[in-house]
Structure formats: structure tokens, C-alpha cells
Image (cartoon, rainbow, N blue to C red):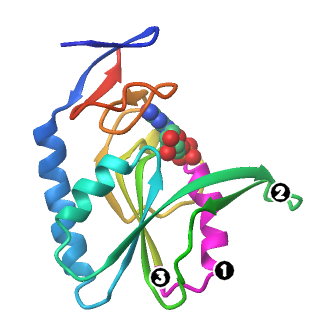
Amino acid sequence: MSIQVLDKTFVPFLTSEMIQDKIEQLAMQISADYLGRNPLFIGILNGSFMFASDLYKRISTPSTISFIKLASYKGTTSTGTVITAIGLEEDLSGRDVVLIEDIVDTGKTLSAFIPSLQKMSPASIKICTLLQKPEALQHELQVDYVGFEIPNKFVVGYGLDYDGYGRNSQEIYQLA
Ligand code: 5GP
């Protein structure tokens, strides 16, 4: 059944079962890859809160989790936009960091943020995203764990919003 969010209509795209099955697979793979390494998961708010929660419940290796918001400002360097983290209090030095993102679209956000994360001397940084739009990617970005590769169409639900609304569903919907 289609849903209405503000002025737009969205149609069903990924069911709750499809999402949860995929998260189970991702969690198994990540747990195996990070066995004995004490990774630090960092969920990027707001969009990833449901995904991060469901993923982290299924991670079986000892690890910690934290959440950040990203803020962008115009840098003075040639790189243009600089992105910094709000709320990051952990000491990252020597930690294996796994960023948890809801969706990678152009890749602009993460490619601008990762350099500032690298300055904190983590042992490694990997990216786990529930959704990726490969056709939209415009920046050099290695995404290590991808739940679903999806077409270049706007989606809502399961934490993803349209103008703040539409996050509260267990399914993901696509713009009609
Ligand atoms: P990027 O920097 O990769 O272009 O964009 C990443 C951010 O754009 C995501 O974290 C998300 O907030 C937003 N975004 C990109 N595509 C979509 C989409 O289809 N639906 C929603 N709700 N947000 C999106």
C-alpha cells in the first residue's frame, strides 16, 4: 500500500523481512571480520538510528558503539566543504572504526568527513551502509559493507526521512 509523506506519495520498496534478513547477513560478516579486534561502531544520526540499532543487536564480537551528527561548513582549503562530527567523545587512536550510515548517495558527506576522522589516528575506518545508490556516486569513496544497491530514486522509511517525516516505518518506500 502506498503512503503519503507531506506532499509526496511513496510506494513499497523493501519489506521489513528483506531489511532484517540483510542486516542479519551484514552482522554475521562484520562479526567474523572483526573477531577479537574490539571495533568501535559509529552511527551517523539521524537517519541511521534504526539500522544501527538492529545491526548492533546482532553483532556478536565484543565492541562499543557511539553516535554522532555531522555538520558541514565551507572550508578555506580547495576541498570546499568540510564536515565535522558533533558528539564524538571516544578516543579513536588504535581503534578499528566502522561507520554506520543509512544511505550513501553522491558520497559527498562521507568523503568530506573521513579525512577529519583519519586525523584521530584510528587503526582502520570502514563504512557500512544499509543502502547505496551506485549511479549517484560522485566522490571517491570505498564502501565496505552495503546492504542494498538501489536505483537513483528518493526513499523514505526505516529511519530515512522526507523533510523530517516518514522515518517511522519498518519498511522502506520509494517515491512514486
Ligand atoms: P551523500 O553525501 O552521499 O550525497 O548523501 C548522504 C545523505 O543524503 C544521507 O545520509 C541522507 O541523509 C541523504 N539522502 C540521500 N539520498 C536519500 C534518499 O533517497 N532518501 C533520504 N531520505 N535521504 C537521502
- The foreground one among 33 and 51 is 51
Looking at marks 2 and 3 on the same chain, the residue that comes earlier in the sequence is marked by: 2
In the rendered image, which residue does mark 2 sit on? Answer: 75
Q: Residue at x 45, y 12 (%)?
A: 6
Query: Disc 2 vs disc 1: Cβ atoms closer than 8 Å?
Result: no
> Is 29 on the left or on the right of 95, as rendered?
left
Q: Residue at x 37, y 25 (%)?
A: 166
Q: Residue at x 53, y 82 (%)?
A: 92
Amino acid type of the residue that numbered disc 1 sits on in the rendered structure: Lys
**Secondary structure beneath disc 3?**
strand
Amino acid type of the residue that numbered disc 3 sits on in the rendered structure: Ser
Check residue 119 in the rendering and tell me which mark sits there, or answer none: 1
In the rendered image, which residue does mark 3 sit on? Answer: 124
Q: Is residue 118 magenta?
A: yes
Up-down relation of residue 48 to residue 98 (above or below): above
Up-down relation of residue 6 to residue 53 (above or below): above
Cα–Cα span, label 2 and label 1 = 16 Å
Amino acid type of the residue that numbered disc 2 sits on in the rendered structure: Gly
Cα–Cα span, label 3 and label 1 = 12 Å
Mark 2 crowd level (few <14, some 14–19, many ≥20, 10 Å Cα): few
